[in-house]
Each structure stands twice: as C-alpha cells, then as structure tokens.
Image (cartoon, rainbow, N blue to C red):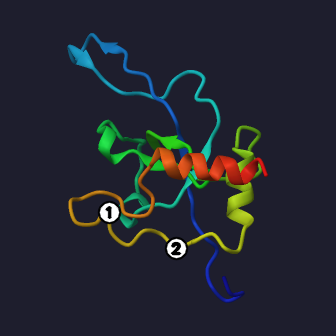
Amino acid sequence: MTSDSPAPIYKAALTKYAMPFDMAAGARAPQIPDDPGIVHAVRPVHSELGIREPYYIEDTGNYRAALCGALVKVIMPNTFKTEEPEACTYCIAETLNPATDHRPILRPGGLFGMYGGDAWSPRRWFRKRVERNK
C-alpha cells in the first residue's frame, strides 16, 4: 500500500446472531445477540460499503472469512476499529500487515455467485491458525 492510496476500509463482523421468535411477525427473525463476542474485520463487497443495518448471512454456502480466518455470519454497518476492546487481536495484526490485500472485493462472487477469495473454508482457517502458532 503506497502513501498516496486511501486508507483501507474494513467492515466489523460477528461470528453469531440470535434467532428469537417475533410474536408480531409470527416468525423467527435474526438479530444481534446481547453478548456479540469478538468483533472481526472483513473486506467488504462494494454493495456492503453503504449498508445501514446489519447484513445477516443465513445461507451456509455464503459464509465469509474474517481477516483472521474466522467464520463470519453478520456484516455490521460500521467500520472495524482497532481501538475497540472487543476487536480481534489477529484481525488487528492482519490490518497492519502490508502483505494483506486491503482492496474491497469488486463483485460478490465468481462463477456461481460464491465469494471468491474471502469465502470461509476450514482448510484456510486451519492454515492461518497453524501460521499464528509458529
């Protein structure tokens, strides 16, 4: 990343959401849990840059990978802030790593609508975990 390029934008993301029964709607609706846990960083798709409400990924084939490799199920409308106490320490390290691809994803998917490089996979997650523990 050069000094004249804009600062990278990462979206805050969560690994879980709650599905309580909404009596008014008569169905279950996703919502942020009372204890959201660790906040991760994800590279946003261009359509996610302007979201105003949380984006819940309910289809297991479209789960995203955080910069640390964690499985992400909720993309938050706010940006990832490294100074937050709940921020993932591994995601913070990845945001500061010059080798990390800091560009937003140009389009959401490859051949079949899947997220190309940022789709979650157990092998990639395990590989990142092994690299961290060296």
Judge the density around disc 2: few (<14), some (14-19), many (≥20) Cα neighbours within 10 Å.
Answer: some
* Residue 76 seen in the current view: no
Q: Is residue 112 above or below residue 133?
A: below
Q: Amino acid at mark 2?
A: Arg
Mark 1 highlights which residue? Answer: 108
Which quadrant of the structure image shows residue 99? bottom right
* Residue 110 seen in the current view: yes
Q: Which mark is residue 103?
A: 2
Q: Is residue 72 above or below residue 31?
A: below
How many numbered marks have been drawn onto this rendered protein structure?
Answer: 2
- Secondary structure at badge 2 equals loop
Q: Which quadrant of the rendered structure holds the N terminus?
A: bottom right
- Secondary structure at badge 1 equals loop
Q: Is residue 103 left or right of residue 129?
A: left
Judge the density around disc 1: few (<14), some (14-19), many (≥20) Cα neighbours within 10 Å.
Answer: some
- Image coordinates of residue 58 in percent, x first then y, are 32, 36
- Image coordinates of residue 12 in percent, x first then y, are 56, 49
- Image coordinates of residue 91 in percent, x first then y, are 67, 52
Residue in the image at 38% along x and 72% along y: 106
Residue in the image at 70% along x and 54% along y: 131
- Image coordinates of residue 42 in percent, x first then y, are 53, 55
Q: Is residue 31 left or right of residue 95?
A: left
> Which of pointers 1 and 2 lies earlier in the amino acid sequence?
2
Q: Amino acid at mark 1?
A: Pro
Between 120 and 8, the one nearer to me in the picture: 120
Residue in the image at 60% along x and 46% along y: 40
Q: Are marks 1 and 2 in contact (CB under 8 Å)?
A: no
Residue in the image at 63% along x and 52% along y: 128
Which quadrant of the structure image shows residue 19? top left
Which quadrant of the structure image shows residue 60? top left
Gap in angstroms between the C-alphas marked 1 and 2:
13 Å
Q: Is residue 131 left or right of residue 118?
A: right
